[in-house]
Amino acid sequence: MSVLKVSDLTRNFGGLCAVNHVNMEIHEQELIGLIGPNGAGKTTLFNLLTGVYEPSSGTIELNVDGKMKSIGGLKPYVITSLGLARTFQNIRLFKNLTVLDNVKIAMHKNIRYGALSGILRLPKYYAEEERVEKESLELLKIVHLDHKKNELAKNMPYGEQRRLEIARALATQPKILFLDEPAAGMNPQETSELTSLIHEIKEKYKITIILIEHDMSLVMNICERIYVLDYGKCIANGTPEEIKNHPRVIEAYLGEEI
């Protein structure tokens, strides 16, 4: 079943066409790679899908309760509430908050008490706060950061900040998780751990994952299908083996030695 469908999606910035009539169809629990040279339009496409930019033309449809709903141009917080979450190429944590608070704050849309319970500190308030803390700690265990729950986010190594950002995105309970260059700046050991983590998240939460990544070994090892962008256009899509041997992809991006 399709969870996301993109039809002729286009985004212009003045005279520049950053995303040019892109078509995609993503299915439940797929692990999709999005690759292409620098400036190909990959992050712009993510920004369109998650509401940061409005489409110049074309449609974005999300499966909501079994029906395809148009989400193009909706605000990011509305799109998040419908089940899309993301990380960013440049890490955007709340750096002066603790690791635990970074995750807890992402759960605000799922809080089950009202303003009155919060103001008066009624029993429902304490029960919900306990639930949120427990679920946040479980997410931190998944990304192997539970032992650093009280540390400030800004004091963590780069690779751990990346993992915390993934935990924060998972806290919104997404059906689709977008990862924008999750391995950027990581050493080989961290990249290997990240690969295992992405597999674990997909299997545990049964969600769809779409990732932008320049590390071809990571992409080829874990992605089931790959879309390739070049100058804003989708020039190919298919399995890793098909992409690796696609003439246009080799010419535009991968090179002869792959």
Image (cartoon, rainbow, N blue to C red):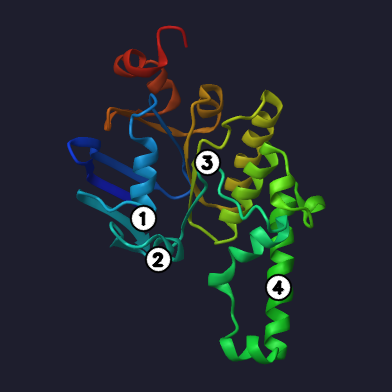
Secondary structure at numbered mark 1 = loop
Residue under numbered circle 3: 90
Residue at 49% across / 31% down in the picture? 213
The answer to whether residue 211 is left or right of residue 102 is left
Q: Which residue is mark 2?
A: 78
Residue placed furthest toward the right: 147
Q: In this rendering, which labeled residue sits more in front, label 2 or label 4? A: 2
Asked if labels 3 and 1 touch by Cβ distance under 8 angstroms, the answer is no
Q: Choose mark 3 or mark 4, whichever is in front.
A: 3
Q: Name the quadrant containing residue 107.
A: bottom right
Residue placed at 72% from the left, 54% from the top?
140
Indicate the secondary structure of the residue bearing disc 4: helix
Which circle's residue, 1 or 4, is located before the other in the chain?
1
Q: Residues within 10 Å of mark 3 (few under 14, many from 20)?
A: few
Q: Which mark is residue 51?
A: 1
Q: Where residue 67 sits in the image (x, y, percent)?
A: 32, 64
Q: Earlier in the sequence, mark 1 or mark 3?
A: 1
Q: Position of residue 91 (x, y in %)?
A: 56, 44
**Observer able to see residue 229:** yes
- The first of marks 2 and 4 along the sequence is 2
Regarding residue 143, the answer to whether it shows in the image is no
Relative horizontal placement of residue 255, taking residue 117 as reference (left or right): left
